[in-house]
Amino acid sequence: MTRRGTASPLVEGQDPQPVSLLLDALRRFLKNRAATAGGIVVILVWIIALSAPLVAPYDPIAHLGSANRLKPPGSPGYLLGTDDFGRDLLSRLIYGARISLQVGIIVVLLSGSIGVTLGAIAGYFGGLTDEIIMRSVDIVMAFPFFILAIAIMAVLGPSLNNAMIALAMVSWVGYARLVRGQVLSVKQKEFIEAARAEGLSDALIILRHVLPNCMAPILIQATLGVGGAILSAAGLSFIGLGAQPPDPEWGAMLNEGREYLRQAPYLTIIPGTAIAVTVLALNLLGDGLRDALDPRLR
């Protein structure tokens, strides 16, 4: 028998229902108002980017005539105004969201694939392999990030595709360092020794047992990396090395509008605000995921 007002004891032989780690992380994430707001903004930008052909009122690269040049925001038919070629700024901003998110994701996928692979190999095998990979990381990190990207662009030539390649070539080192540290910790666990005793190959151990236990920090790094890639790509486009006219990329729009700062400041304010809000939202989302997935906060 149990006393009134006290919890009933567990039935003999029955284990307590474990709390789902995913649900627990989701609850802690939703309690973080800043992270939740960032996630909502990111989702909205995603929806707008995916539905660009449906929601954009005009073709983003179509010239609407010299009579429609530099119309201010709020003009009839042009909610955010037009640029110096008479192109609708709202349409270019919407399509720019698609390009910027595409750049961020592709850069993260390329740099993450390289960095995770090399970091896992370095951490798991150690020795000379570890020395070669980590000294390569040190060499890349010895150069300023943006200067090295510009140097690579000078070799590849200005284009958005080359900008993504250049950013991936200088961004993989962060993933390599992160994954190497995680693998050094995970490979000492007992379940890794058990996998070796079963005769699994090193490749299977890394893929099935090591990397799945490193996914939380990789996910956080990737979320933050998307924002960094968008900002870096916009910087390259601003100096003429990324997206080329008439592509409606946010950094290129900033470059086009800088000549009209006094006459039409909205040409730079609007895409600049879009970059700032999107990158801030991604950073808030990444910080929230880091706090939610941190096992020390359980």
Image: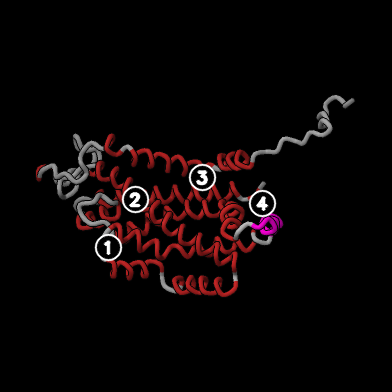
Q: Indicate the position of residue 290 as horizontal and vertical percent values.
A: 56, 51
Q: Is residue 181 left or right of residue 222?
A: right
Query: Rounded to the nearest whole Å, what is the CA distance between mark 4 and mark 3?
Result: 19 Å
Helix, strand or loop status at disc 2? helix
Mark 2 or 3 closer to N-term? Answer: 3
Q: What residue does disc 3 label?
A: 35
- The first of marks 4 and 3 along the sequence is 3
The first of marks 1 and 4 along the sequence is 1
Tell me how far mark 2 sits from mark 3, CA to CA: 21 Å
Say whether residue 83 is left or right of residue 17.
left
Residue 296's mark?
4
Image point 28% across, 51% down: which residue?
Answer: 249
Front-most of 115 and 84?
115
- Foreground: disc 1 or disc 3: 1
Where does the N terminus fall, quadrant-wise? top right
* Amino acid, disc 4: Arg
